[in-house]
């Protein structure tokens, strides 16, 4: 018996993982160069295009994500944290092999609660 995992499920796993990391957010797709990603819609709440693309080649998965990072955070540190968390969760939940998680920092945002 074979189980097929859709790309939208893989995208949801990546999005939920990234939502759980403090100080980052997936950037709106309009900020991302068109040749790097495609527009995927976030589930729930206001539907806004996001810079998150998941591709699958057999048992291998590649994730490309554009992030906005909170001002004052270590860019390399949060990008690395995002890469590790997404790879671990996708592999753990699906049994697929994550070939790469490519992170592009597209912007810096003010910490929540500041005007």
Image (cartoon, rainbow, N blue to C red):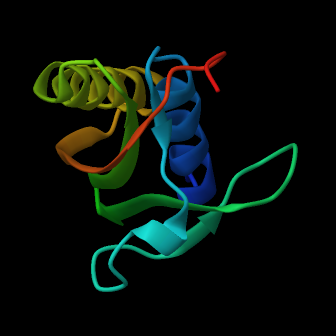
Q: Give the image location of residue 19, x and y in percent.
A: 56, 27
Q: Where's the N terminus, which quadrant?
A: top right
Res 3 seen here: no
Q: Nearer the viewer, residue 16 or 10?
A: 16
Q: How many marks?
A: 0
Residue 93, above or below 100:
above
**Residue farthest right in this picture:** 45
**Residue farthest bottom in this picture:** 35
Which image quarter: residue 113? top right
**What residue lies at 51% left-to-right and 46% top-to-bottom?**
10
Residue 35, above or below 76:
below
Residue 29 placement, left or right of 82: right
**What residue lies at 24% left-to-right and 19% top-to-bottom?**
81
Res 112 seen here: yes
Q: Nearer the viewer, residue 34 or 9?
A: 34
**Residue farthest front in this picture:** 115
Q: Nearer the viewer, residue 91 or 112?
A: 112
Q: Give the image location of residue 75, x and y in percent.
A: 19, 29
Which image quarter: residue 13? top right
Q: Where's the C terminus, which quadrant?
A: top right
Q: Give the image location of residue 49, x and y in percent.
A: 64, 65
Residue 55, above or below 14:
below
Residue 67 placement, left or right of 13: left
**What residue lies at 72% left-to-right and 61% top-to-bottom?**
48
Q: Give the image location of residue 7, x and y in percent.
A: 53, 59
Residue 58 placement, left or right of 8: left
């Amino acid at each position: 018996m074979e189980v097929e995992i859709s790309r939208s499920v893989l995208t949801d796993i990546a999005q939920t993982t990234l939502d759980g990391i403090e100080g980052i957010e997936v950037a709106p797709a309009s900020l991302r160069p068109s040749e790097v990603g495609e527009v995927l819609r976030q589930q729930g709440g206001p539907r806004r295009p996001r810079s998150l693309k998941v591709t699958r080649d057999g048992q291998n998965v590649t994730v490309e994500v554009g992030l906005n990072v909170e001002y004052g955070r270590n860019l390399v540190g949060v990008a690395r944290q995002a890469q590790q968390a997404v790879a671990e969760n996708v592999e753990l939940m699906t049994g697929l092999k994550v070939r790469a998680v490519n992170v592009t920092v597209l912007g810096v945002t003010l910490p929540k609660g500041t005007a």
